Amino acid sequence: MAKREINYGDLAVVKEPPTRDIEPQTQAEPDPDDLSGPVKDTEYLKDIAQSVLLYISPEAHKQLLMYSVEQSSHRNRVRVHDCLIEALEMWFEVKGLPGPVRAKERVKTGQGTRRR
């Protein structure tokens, strides 16, 4: 079977660019039916919050984990994230910075309801 000849087209290295008559493409106005609707509020934290990367020592992380386990109970789990948010909220208070720190209030499960 014979191989086809490869056409490199514009990939050839030349000192002068080839001259072409390129007409600028005009974009047609999109139909109102094609436009997407307003941005919907979602329930996902990643859609409404700004993520921040924090580097801490492994020992500090271990201490945070141990503290969160000590503070947790069978029905009330304390997460490291919540401990860090509370610390940041206290820092905001001390510095007099306005605004909420927590992007979305915690969902408190009532007795008899299950978390997913």
Image (cartoon, rainbow, N blue to C red):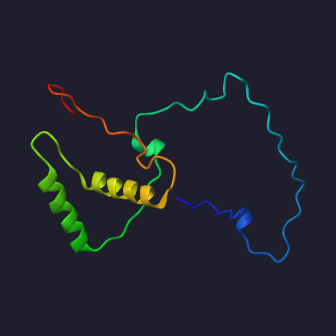
Residue 99 placed where, x, y %?
50, 48
**Residue occupying the point 30% across, 54% down:** 81
Q: Quadrant of the C terminus?
A: top left
Q: Nearer the viewer, residue 93 or 112?
A: 93
**Residue occupying the point 18% across, 45% down:** 77
Residue 54 placed where, x, y %?
38, 65
- Looking at the image, residue 2 lies above or below residue 44: below
- Looking at the image, residue 85 lies above or below residue 35: below
**Residue occupying the point 73% across, 25% down:** 31
Residue 49 placed where, x, y %?
46, 47
In the displayed structure, does residue 68 sit left or right of residue 81?
left
Outermost residue, left direction?
74
In the displayed structure, does residue 61 sit left or right of residue 86?
left
Q: Nearer the viewer, residue 35 or 88?
A: 88
In the displayed structure, does residue 63 sit left or right of residue 96?
left
**Residue occupying the point 71% across, 23% down:** 32
Q: Nearer the viewer, residue 21 or 80?
A: 80
Which quarter of the picture shows residue 93?
bottom left
In the displayed structure, does residue 97 sit left or right of residue 89?
right
Outermost residue, top direction?
33
The mark total stands at: 0
Which quarter of the picture shows residue 76?
top left
- Looking at the image, residue 42 lies above or below residue 48: above
